[in-house]
Image (tube, grey):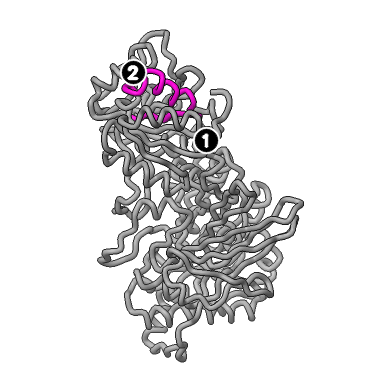
């Protein structure tokens, strides 16, 4: 590959009427903001003439059988393909026909490997074309037995294939050329379905790797001028549960601070509001001094099982407001500021919960689980977890985070999509002087993207989709209830901002500094425009109308004792784990010295 394509429009081709694959492809193009048109081969004469003379650069996507017929159609077909910035070709179920068509296209023999692998196979993304592969450059992972059931087998030394992704050293995504046009080939005959429900606790790209990763790489590479891009690749480590003291369980905060300064990352502490009285002046001073490295978020309220997982709005509202009251009291006592971000205990939230948090003044939630608890017809879909944040539930943003065991490939794919990199850990992750943490941070730092480690709140405020239209106006798609926009150019710039809002009647005001912005509701979104001088930034806040606030409900003595017992027992468990680990290390050292 040489010059990078700069296509601004997609042509989705099919032999006859579009199949389900083409419909799925169109939904993916819409999701990424790529303009497109659909055409079947009966339009070829018109299409070949019109699009080859268009001023707007275009790229073509379609099944291999459609391209085979195009190139057999004479000048119109050759003109259509030859004028394209790039072409994306995917396989069909008829492998025999695909082999003949690809051999005709590329003028060298090719075949498919269709027998599923009996064992797991190493899947490798090339490091040779980082502009195309982005954050997934060089990523390796093992696939499950039975995958893939397809791969290219280019024959002979005359192969013109350049492998981009291989499974067991055989290409499943490749590129070649027809004339000067780069032709990308995906061995999979599937296009991932954005409307498919998520059935697991978190999204794992391994299940959709062959039907999703090649296509997303192609779209991000070829349509870079028009596709939605992240403002930045924000990142933050989130530690659940700890008290603010020098050491909690296996996590030594002074040692962690040294690691953060050395390896340049940040940490957010998901603090349990019940502990609001338990931060000493000495420890408060430490965390106040290190605000560039440590930030604080809200982790539930009492941190009992599924406390935000039930459907009662009144009870949820009471919990959400009590958590804020405690965190404000903690801030008054300790001087430590906190982010108005909810991190759900045990990853459990109900479908009613996001609206409660929205009206209570939280700017976002963060969670590992992607679907609400209980039986609900409003299922989280793949399009939700591909988006910067899940906004399916009354348009309140729930940002997803990952454990280290989810695998580097999932962090890399999230970054390819433009999602922030949020890492979750508990104190036991810091055993052995944080060796596992360092390995993860180094792996993330090796990904081909510029990670911006910030406080959790700042990561979420800057987690936006962005592009610049032909007139120079910056289009923003914001997610959190607050957005920070920085005009890094020397000149005044106009920003047109949209935010999904299912209930615009809940919006009280949109604030930009001391000013109130005029906004309008249109098509499920709130829209407004703002000019920002060169070199300046602005924080814009959505303020919602709050529900009528009654006095906070009193908790029974029995309930308070129950919560206290849970907290104490949890802390004893974590301390026991620390001392057991220390003893294990001491015994190991003694044995090695013998």
Q: Is residue 165 left or right of residue 438?
A: left
Q: Of the numbered discs in the image, which one, if any, rests on residue 7?
A: 1
Secondary element under disc 1, as helix, strand or loop, is loop
Q: Nearer the viewer, residue 119 or 530?
A: 530
Towards the viewer: 68 or 489: 68
Q: Is residue 441 magenta?
A: no
Location of residue 557 by image quarter: bottom left
Q: Contact (CB < 8 A) between labels 1 and 2?
A: no
- Few, some or many residues within 10 Å of mark 1 (<14, 14–19, 20+): many
Q: Residue at x 59, y 72 (%)?
A: 518
Front-lying residue, 161 or 113: 161
Q: Magenta residues, as a range?
A: 68-90
Q: CA distance from mark 1 to mark 2?
A: 25 Å
Q: Secondary structure at mark 2?
A: loop
Residue occupied by mark 2: 72
In the image, residue 93 lies at what x, y percent?
24, 29
Residue 394 position in % (x across, y down): 40, 69
Where residue 458 sits: x, y (%)? 61, 61
Which residue lies at the image location 44% right of the left edge and 15% below the top edge? 160
Q: Nearer the viewer, residue 6 or 51?
A: 51
Earlier in the chain: of badge 1 and badge 2, it is: 1
Give the mark toward the camera: 1 or 2.
Answer: 2
């Amino acid at each position: 590959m040489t010059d990078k394509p700069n296509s601004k429009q997609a042509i989705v081709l099919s032999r006859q009427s579009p199949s389900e694959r083409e419909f799925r492809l169109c939904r993916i193009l819409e999701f990424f903001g790529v303009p497109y048109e659909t055409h079947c081969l009966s339009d070829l004469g018109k299409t070949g003439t019109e699009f080859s003379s268009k001023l707007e650069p275009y790229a073509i996507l379609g099944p291999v059988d459609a391209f085979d017929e195009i190139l057999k159609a004479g000048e119109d077909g050759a003109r259509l393909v030859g004028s394209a910035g790039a072409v994306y070709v995917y396989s069909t179920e008829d492998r025999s026909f695909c082999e003949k068509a690809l051999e005709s296209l590329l003028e060298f023999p090719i075949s498919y490997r269709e027998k599923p692998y009996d064992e797991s196979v190493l899947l490798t993304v090339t490091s040779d074309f980082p502009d195309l592969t982005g954050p997934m450059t060089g990523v390796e992972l093992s696939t499950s037995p039975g995958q893939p059931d397809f791969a290219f087998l280019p024959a002979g030394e005359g192969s013109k294939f350049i492998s981009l992704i291989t499974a067991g050293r055989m290409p499943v995504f490749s590129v070649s050329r027809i004339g000067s046009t780069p032709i990308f080939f995906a061995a999979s005959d599937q296009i991932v379905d954005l409307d498919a429900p998520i059935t697991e606790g978190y999204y794992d790209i391994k299940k959709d790797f062959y039907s999703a990763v090649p296509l997303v790489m192609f779209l991000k590479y070829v349509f870079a001028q028009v596709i939605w891009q992240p403002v930045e690749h924000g990142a933050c480590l989130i530690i659940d549960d700890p008290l603010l003291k020098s050491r909690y369980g296996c996590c030594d905060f002074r040692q962690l601070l040294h690691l953060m300064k050395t390896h340049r990352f940040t940490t957010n502490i998901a603090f349990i509001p019940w502990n609001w009285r338990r931060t000493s002046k000495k420890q408060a001073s430490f965390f106040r001094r290190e605000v560039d490295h440590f930030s604080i978020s809200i982790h539930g309220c009492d941190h009992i099982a599924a406390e935000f997982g039930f459907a009662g709005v009144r009870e949820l509202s009471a919990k959400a407001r009590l958590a804020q009251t405690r965190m404000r009291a903690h801030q008054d006592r300790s001087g430590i500021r906190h982010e108005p971000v909810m991190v759900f205990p045990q990853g459990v939230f109900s479908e009613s919960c996001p609206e409660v948090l929205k009206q209570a003044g939280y700017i976002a939630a963060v969670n590992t689980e992607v679907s609400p608890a209980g039986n609900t017809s409003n299922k989280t879909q793949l399009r939700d977890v591909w988006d910067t944040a899940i906004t399916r539930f009354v348009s309140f943003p729930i940002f997803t985070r990952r454990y280290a065991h989810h695998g580097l490939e999932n962090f890399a794919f999230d970054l390819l999509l433009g999602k922030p990199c949020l890492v979750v850990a508990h104190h036991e992750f810091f055993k052995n002087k944080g060796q596992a943490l360092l390995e993860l941070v180094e792996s993330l730092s090796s990904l081909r993207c510029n990670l911006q480690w910030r406080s959790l709140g700042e990561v979420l405020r800057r987690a936006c989709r962005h592009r610049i239209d032909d007139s120079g106006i910056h289009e923003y798609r914001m997610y959190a209830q607050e957005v920070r926009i920085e005009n890094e150019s020397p000149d005044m710039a106009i920003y047109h901002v949209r935010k999904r809002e299912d209930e615009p009647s809940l919006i009280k005001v949109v604030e930009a500094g001391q000013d109130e912005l005029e906004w309008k509701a249109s098509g499920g979104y709130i829209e407004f425009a703002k000019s920002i001088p060169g070199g300046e930034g602005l924080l814009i806040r959505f303020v919602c109308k709050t529900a009528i606030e009654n006095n906070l409900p009193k908790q029974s003595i029995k309930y308070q004792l129950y919560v206290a017992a849970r907290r104490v027992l949890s802390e004893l468990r974590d301390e026991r784990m620390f001392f057991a680990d220390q003893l294990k290390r001491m015994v190991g050292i003694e044995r090695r010295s013998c």
